[in-house]
């Protein structure tokens, strides 16, 4: 029988049996958990007396059968035994989507990847506060892009990722939301492939859908919006794109859009969207500081200025904003005076 267990190992003595490479991660993980770890590399080093102070025996070996004397002696003494898969030889990279910033919106696959990581390269938007617990024993490297601070340039992140994997480590590149939504995940995959490093991805819950949802706004709604377009506001959009967006008539979701809000809103109005189309600016979704500012296309810049809206925020443009659950004001109020809902 196999099962997922969470063990409190602080103060316990754990015997780890297995070859150096296979056992390395396990030794580190239990050590980081506060256990006293003893390791034996081969069955010839085993003596039943070794078990005198041991509470848990962990076998990490391609041929776990060769540890039968240890398994047998542990069973007799009713010592817990865990047989773990040895780490694959050679390192690899896993791009992990960290979701919109809270630990309980990490997927189970993301948690597993973090638990098994030797190195984690993380972003500011990823759920980094509890990273030490999620990735016990891993080296944690902040490569976050803090505006105004000194981020690690993208080519260096990719070089570091590849180098660590080539050193034999299991590297997790943890990103906010989903790695393939404005996350440069594609570029990082290409670097790994070019360097011959095995790479895989774990999708994440993207803020483009989840942050509007946190404010009670569904990005589609039967009869209201049957399409939603996610755009980056990092650079102002060219007129043809604004026209296409306006013509499509669906919900427009803008990430990284606070800086270019004036160009976007005036551009969409010029492209034909009505100036009374509702707009929601949802800041710091899923955090205690989450805040929603409701306005209109024509009034969004004034509303954002008055409310001092800052990044990270998701801007939602379209009729679905009227479905905002906490809509306390009547439609006319909202259309005439921008309001702030919490
Ligand atoms: N890959 C990410 C997006 C990266 S771009 C994803 O799929 O979610 C970063 C932008 O995402 C921010 O500028 C902001 O617009 C948005 N964002 C991410 N997390 C957010 C959050 N918790 N609250 C509000 N906006 C968020």
Image (spheres, rainbow, N blue to C red):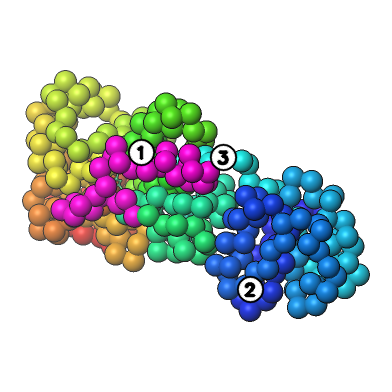
Q: Earlier in the sequence, mark 3 or mark 1?
A: 3
Q: Position of residue 247 (x, y in %)?
A: 23, 23
Question: Going 33% across and 43% down the picture, which residue do you hit?
Answer: 157
Residue 90: mark in rendering: 3
C-alpha span from label 1 to label 2:
35 Å
Q: Nearer the viewer, residue 20 or 126?
A: 20
Mark 3: which secondary structure?
loop
Find residue 9 and report its image quarter. Answer: bottom right
Residue holding disc 1:
158
Dot in front, 1 or 2: 2
Q: Position of residue 172 (x, y in %)?
A: 47, 47
Viewed as shown, does residue 31 lie left or right of 104?
right
Asked whether mark 3 and ligand 1 are closer than 8 Å, the reply comes as no
- Is disc 2 in contact with disc 3, using a CB cutoff of under 8 Å? no
Magenta stretch: give its range.
142-171
166 in the magenta segment: yes
Question: Going 68% across and 68% down the picture, which residue do you hit?
Answer: 38
C-alpha span from label 2 to label 3:
27 Å
Q: Within 10 Å of the Cα at label 1, are there few (<14), some (14-19), or many (20+) other Cα atoms? A: some
C-alpha span from label 3 to label 1:
18 Å
Q: Within 10 Å of the Cα at label 3, are there few (<14), some (14-19), or many (20+) other Cα atoms? A: some
- Is disc 1 in contact with disc 2, using a CB cutoff of under 8 Å? no
Residue 287: mark in rendering: none
Dot in front, 3 or 1: 3
Please indicate, yes or no, whether residue 181 appears anywhere in the rendered image: no
Residue holding disc 2:
36
Q: Earlier in the sequence, mark 1 or mark 2?
A: 2
Q: Within 10 Å of the Cα at label 2, are there few (<14), some (14-19), or many (20+) other Cα atoms? A: some
Q: Earlier in the sequence, mark 2 or mark 3?
A: 2
Q: How many marks?
A: 3
């Amino acid at each position: 029988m196999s099962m997922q267990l969470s063990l409190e190992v602080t103060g316990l003595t754990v015997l780890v049996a297995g070859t150096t490479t296979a056992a390395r991660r396990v030794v580190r993980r239990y050590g980081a958990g506060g256990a006293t770890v003893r390791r034996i590399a081969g069955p010839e080093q085993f003596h039943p007396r070794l078990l005198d102070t041991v509470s848990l025996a962990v076998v990490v070996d391609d041929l776990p059968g060769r540890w039968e004397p240890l398994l047998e002696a542990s069973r007799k003494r009713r010592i817990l035994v865990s047989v773990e898969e040895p780490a694959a030889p050679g390192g690899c990279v896993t791009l992990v989507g960290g979701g919109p910033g809270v630990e309980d919106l990490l997927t189970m696959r993301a948690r597993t990847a973090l638990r098994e990581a030797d190195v984690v390269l993380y972003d500011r938007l990823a759920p980094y506060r509890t990273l030490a617990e999620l990735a016990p024993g891993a080296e944690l490297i902040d490569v976050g892009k803090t505006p105004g601070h000194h981020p690690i340039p993208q080519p260096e992140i990719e070089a570091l990722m590849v180098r660590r994997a080539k050193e034999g480590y299991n590297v997790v590149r943890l990103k906010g939301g989903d790695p393939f939504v404005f996350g440069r995940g594609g570029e990082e995959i290409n670097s790994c492939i070019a360097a011959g490093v095995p790479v895989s991805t774990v999708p994440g819950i993207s803020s483009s859908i989840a942050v509007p949802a946190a404010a009670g706004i569904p990005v589609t709604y039967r009869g209201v919006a049957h399409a939603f377009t996610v755009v980056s506001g990092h650079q102002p959009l060219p007129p043809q794109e604004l026209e296409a967006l306006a013509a499509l008539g669906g919900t427009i979701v803008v990430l990284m859009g606070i800086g270019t809000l004036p160009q976007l809103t005036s551009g969409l109005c010029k492209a034909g969207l009505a100036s009374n189309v509702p707009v929601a600016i949802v800041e710091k979704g899923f955090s205690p500081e989450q805040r929603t500012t409701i306005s209109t296309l024509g009034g969004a810049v004034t509303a954002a200025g008055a409310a001092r809206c800052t990044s990270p925020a998701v801007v939602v443009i379209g009729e679905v904003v009227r479905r905002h659950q906490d809509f306390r004001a009547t439609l006319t109020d909202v259309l005439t005076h921008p309001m702030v809902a919490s």
